[in-house]
Structure formats: C-alpha cells, structure tokens
Amino acid sequence: MALMMTRRFKGTTRALLPNFGLGLFYHTQTFYLGLSAPRILEVKLNANQNIDTLTLARERTNYYGTVGVVVSLSDDWKLKPSALVKMIPTRAPIQTDLNLSVLYKDRFELGGSFRADGKFKPESVNAIAMLHFANGLKIGYAYDFTLSRLQNYNSGSHEVTLGYEFGGKKMRYLTPRYF
C-alpha cells in the first residue's frame, strides 16, 4: 500500500493507493522454485487525483520467476547455481540474472552474477562474498559493474547485506537452509 503526497501551488494532495501481490514458493533442503507478482494492480500516480491531466508515474505489474539448487561437491564444498527472470509485459525487456557461487564448510560463500536483457545482451556482472556465522548471522558484500550504456553514468555500485537466521546452529542440524 502506498501513500502519495505531492506539493502544488494551492496545497498538498494525499491519496491512498492500495495494492496487493501474490506469490508461490516451493523449497526442499537443496532446491527452490518461486513465482511472484508483488504489485497486481496497475496504479497511476497523478498530480491531482480528481483530474487525469498529469500522470507522474505508474505502478506496473512485475512478474518474477526464480530457481536454485545446492549441489554437494564434497563434505566441505557446495555449488549454488540459481536464476532470476524479471518481466513487465509490453513495458520493458525481460531481464535474466544467472548466479553461481561456491560455499565452503557452510561458512564462506564466494560467487558471481551476470545480468542480461531479453536478447541476452549483457547489462552487468557482479562479485559476491558472504560469511555465515554459527549463531545464524550472515554478512555479505557485492559489487555490481554495469556493462550497458548506463556505464557512461554509473561506475558500479556496492551493496552490504546483514542477515540473521533465527534458531541459529540448532536449526541448521535439523534442516540446513542454503537460501
């Protein structure tokens, strides 16, 4: 749900813009598959909600599909390939993210990612590193390097993540989760 506020010469416009999403997610200890549409309603954000003269922006329906697996190479090493497909029908090209990382002793993860558009033209490459602590804490870093025409305006981006898996080490023995 979003609350839009715009400033005009004669005051402020406020509007409540409800929306909802749907998704399905299936997983096992070493595999996952998901489909989602986070915003189902296509909402217009107008400068004046009573008069459709100036549309500031629109929320379009986005669709996502994802799949991933963990392949055990040995007791210490695991391979984690995954993919994400993003689509906004008739509004933007399909985007595909292909990811591959290796996990060492369920503690250190190092990997990369490649993003391409609908014609599989490269858009970005990413480097990813993450530490998994025994108490459930996860700390990660990623660097995204742009390959598209946007590289003229963007020299890359940095991302730091912090996560926590409730239940810690005890739950890892009962049902190890790699995602």
Image (cartoon, rainbow, N blue to C red):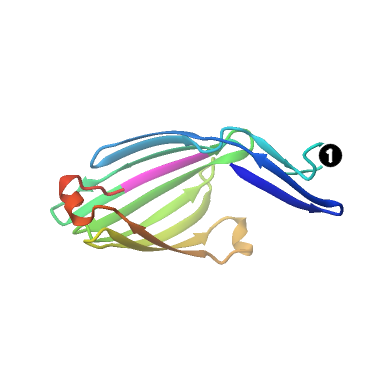
Q: Nearer the viewer, residue 142 or 11?
A: 11
Residue 54 visible:
yes
Q: Nearer the viewer, residue 129 or 3?
A: 3
**Residue 117: percent from the left, percent from the top?**
54, 44
Asked if residue 1 is positioned above or below residue 127 in the image, the reply reads: above
Residue located farthest toward the right when viewing the structure as drawn: 10
Q: Which residue is mark 1?
A: 53
Q: How many marks?
A: 1
**Residue 163: percent from the left, percent from the top?**
35, 58
Q: Nearer the viewer, residue 154 or 4?
A: 4
Q: Give the secondary structure at mark 1.
A: loop
Question: Residue at position x 59%, y 61% from top?
Answer: 151
Apparent side of residue 60 relative to residue 50 in the rendered image (left or right): left
Question: Residue at position x 58%, y 55% from top?
Answer: 148
Label 1 Cα neighbours within 10 Å, binned few <14 / some 14-19 / many ≥20: few
Magenta stretch encompasses residue 94: no
Overall secondary structure of the magenta section: strand
Residue located farthest toward the left when viewing the structure as drawn: 75
Residue 89 falls in which quadrant of the image?
top right
Question: Residue at position x 25%, y 56% from top?
Answer: 103
Residue type of the residue flagged with mark 1? Thr
Residue 132 falls in which quadrant of the image?
bottom left
Q: Which residues are magenta?
A: 81-86
Apparent side of residue 123 relative to residue 103 in the rendered image (left or right): right
Magenta stretch encompasses residue 82: yes
Residue 15 falls in which quadrant of the image?
top right
Q: Nearer the viewer, residue 94 or 52?
A: 52
Asked if residue 109 is positioned above or below residue 82 in the image, the reply reads: below
Name the quadrant of the N terminus: top right
Residue 57 visible:
no
